[in-house]
Amino acid sequence: MRNKVWVISEVYYPDEQGTAYYMTKLAEGLAQYFDVNVLCGYPTVTARGKAVPKKEIHNGVQVERCRGTTFNKDFFVLRLVNLFTNGFSVFFKALLKIKNRDIVLVVTGPHILHFLGKLACYIRSAKCILRVDDVYPEALIATGVLNEKSLVARILFYMNQVLYRSMNQIVVLGRDMKQLAINKLNSSKVDVTIIPNWADIDQVYPQSKKNNLLLKELGLIEKFVVQCAGNMGRAQGIENMFDAIELLRNEKNIHFLFIGGGIKRDWMQNEVKRKGLTNVTILDQRSRSDQRNFLNACDIAMASLLPRMTGAGVPSRMYNVMAAGKPIIAVAGSDSELPMVVKEEQVGWIVPPDEPDKLVQAIHEALSSPARLLKMGERARLVVEKKYCPYKVINEYRNVINTLNKI
């Protein structure tokens, strides 16, 4: 009989944004080697409101959805209601399902599910792996949601320290994130392993800009297009990007293309109208099935994080951007994973946060260096094929699980 592995996640298929997508593909990849079961909530993101069965076998994974509320997560209070109702629904189901020495993979997020998942493992004598997608409360402090000295922040610091130290294994997405995890562990002897997210190298690959359907539709084929695709939230430093957009407003050959959604999207649209910006286009989130088209709809991509986000999160979008053969302008602290990769692999430019003039300078350098851009894009594609392919990443998780099985 194959070992039973449980994946506990707030979001899962048919949601396809961020954590939902990666946890779905990870579970399906591990199902080649283990008996994989998933406990999750009903769709709350891209597939919110879609009718789905309570139980199903999807691509070799036994999925059981636990009933909770599915209010619009863009409203903070409603999202809190979702987090608590879904969290406890999954927790009680986990108590019934998880058995002694099963292995449970829980993922962090702005919810309580990773705490409840660990509690269920403790009660049922199961082993627990924590996958750290974002580090809390650091991410909330960096984005201004919490004051570092507040009582809530101090409580969350303590709770997360206890959580990290109670784990059998911790998986993080980058080197800067590993350091934050080690700080929480202090002297506790819990292994911390870096396993990055991956690029969809079979679905996303370089295509000619001149034949790009999205750019043709938007009338941008002849422009030098700087693209930012993904979440437009508090952590992304959107204001800094818009400062650069305003500085370049009179350079008609440069155009900015934003694709995605998030809490900052309305602010962005209001800025475009208020300042009469004609060098920027903002589009809704597009389906992952359209990634090859929209990720190739640019000359260079831009990824940004706030200064204090170092270690608190790694933008997974960079891997698929590289799969499309696009260089990256990394707007982030030099000691975070994003600029580390860009520098090591020589696939773009690194710009300090909150310095829009330097962002403008990097865009000008890219514009004036077509041959250099081409070489960077070619290197980017080769790098993801070698280091960030799905098979390699899933095999690293397989090794972590096998190691725990031997203990």
Image (cartoon, rainbow, N blue to C red):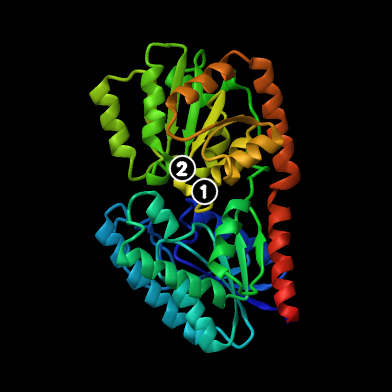
Query: Where is residue 110 drawn, in percent x and y?
Result: 40, 61
Q: Is residue 191 left or right of residue 282?
A: right
Could you tell me how far apart the alpha carbons at marks 2 and 1 are, in whole angstroms?
7 Å
Q: Is residue 69 above or below residue 374?
A: below
Element under label 1? loop
- State which quadrant residue 283 falls in: top left
Q: CB atoms at circles 2 and 1 under 8 Å apart?
A: yes
Q: Which residue matches tag 2?
A: 307
**Three-letter amino acid code at the position of disc 2:** Pro
Residue 284, horizontal then vertical, whole percent: 38, 37
Q: Residue at x 45, y 39 (%)?
A: 286
**Is 43 placed above or below 302 here?**
below
Residue 321 found in image quarter: top right
Label 1: how many residues lie within 10 Å, few (<14), some (14-19) or many (20+)?
many
**Residue 6 appears anywhere in the view:** yes
| Image coordinates for residue 138, horizontal then vertical, percent | 44, 57
Is 15 in front, or is 131? 131
Q: Residue at x 49, y 20 (%)?
A: 216
Horizontal and vertical percent position of residue 320: 60, 40
> Which of 24/353 is in front?
353
What amino acid is found at the position of numbered circle 1 in the picture? Answer: Thr
At horizontal 36% and vertical 56% (from top left) the residue drawn is: 48
Res 32 seen here: no
The residue indicated by pointer 1 is: 310
